[in-house]
Image (cartoon, rainbow, N blue to C red):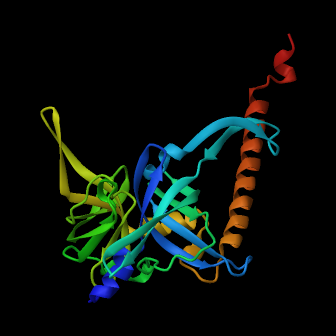
Amino acid sequence: MLNLQERHEKILYPVVRIRAGSAGGSGTVIYSKPNPIKPGEFQTFILTCSHVVDSCIKTAKDWDGLLKKKVEKEILEQVSVETFDYVYMSQVNSSNSHRADIVAYDKYHDIAVLKLDSPKKVEYVAQIIPKERIGDIKIFTPVYAAGCSLLHDPFPNLGEITYLTEDIDNKRYYMNNADQIFGNSGGSVFLAETGEQIGITARVTITQMGFNLDVQTWMNFCVCPERIYEFIDEQELKFLYDDSDSFDKALKRREKKEKEAKLLQMAREDQEEAEATPSDATLTV
């Protein structure tokens, strides 16, 4: 079981506050390591929910040099990420605001990864539970849910896993009873025993009583760890858990994947255009 200092370092300190346009929520530092291309600088990444940063994701028509035509392109605005300094173990001494880029997102998974626009190291980083130990998570497993409820400074709530196979929009979630509310979205659920991250807080149950909405703060749902790994692999961001990989390698893989997708799209559109054009035989009367 973690001692008091370890609970602060593994569960509380990695949690950040996110402000994105008109929205806000929580996030968790999951990577802060030296930049292999720029000695002395660090690369830091934040895990959060896609819906927390959704207002900073836009699209617009623009010219594409590869496809040679105007296409819908995404415009990813920077968001604000606040990290926190603590004194006397538990007291917030200051908050530091950083700009951050949206590196990857998936609205279906409701996951996003941000990269701090800062070369400084972030000292405390959360650890995602290893793939091989995900099966150890059971109902009654004690957990802490840490986040910025109502955009308050980060704090933890203790609870237990209460359901493992909640299906929402054809995606699997864990349910837990650690009290959470708006603003916790994007924060993390941690194993109380080890401090490892096992989920991203994403939803809370709301019932309608007449004209009023009642929030069931003890029925909360987090993105399960299998889906976190699935998202990371789909987005070519394996460096977040694999030390043999790097962000630079990930960018090259992503650029290649994007180029291949564009070429496939161009070939498909050419094929559709050819099929829609009448043949010479059809034109003969």
Quadrant that contains the N terminus: bottom left
- Left or right placement of residue 97 versus residue 1 in this view: right
- Left or right placement of residue 1 versus residue 244 in this view: left
- Left or right placement of residue 251 versus residue 110 in this view: right
Quadrant that contains the C terminus: top right
Residue at coordinates 51% horizontally, 63% vertically from top-left?
A: 231
Q: Nearer the viewer, residue 132 or 161?
A: 161
Q: Nearer the viewer, residue 57 or 235?
A: 57
Q: Nearer the viewer, residue 102 or 221?
A: 102
Q: Nearer the viewer, residue 134 or 154?
A: 154
**Residue 145: which quarter of the image?**
bottom left
- The relative height of residue 147 versus residue 19 in the rendered view (above or below) is below
- The relative height of residue 140 versus residue 202 in the rendered view (above or below) is below
Visible residue check, residue 109: no
The image shows residue 58 at horizontal and vertical percentages of 58, 41
The image shows residue 135 at horizontal and vertical percentages of 34, 78
Total numbered labels: 0
- The relative height of residue 8 versus residue 145 in the rendered view (above or below) is below
Residue at coordinates 21% horizontally, 62% vertically from top-left?
A: 179
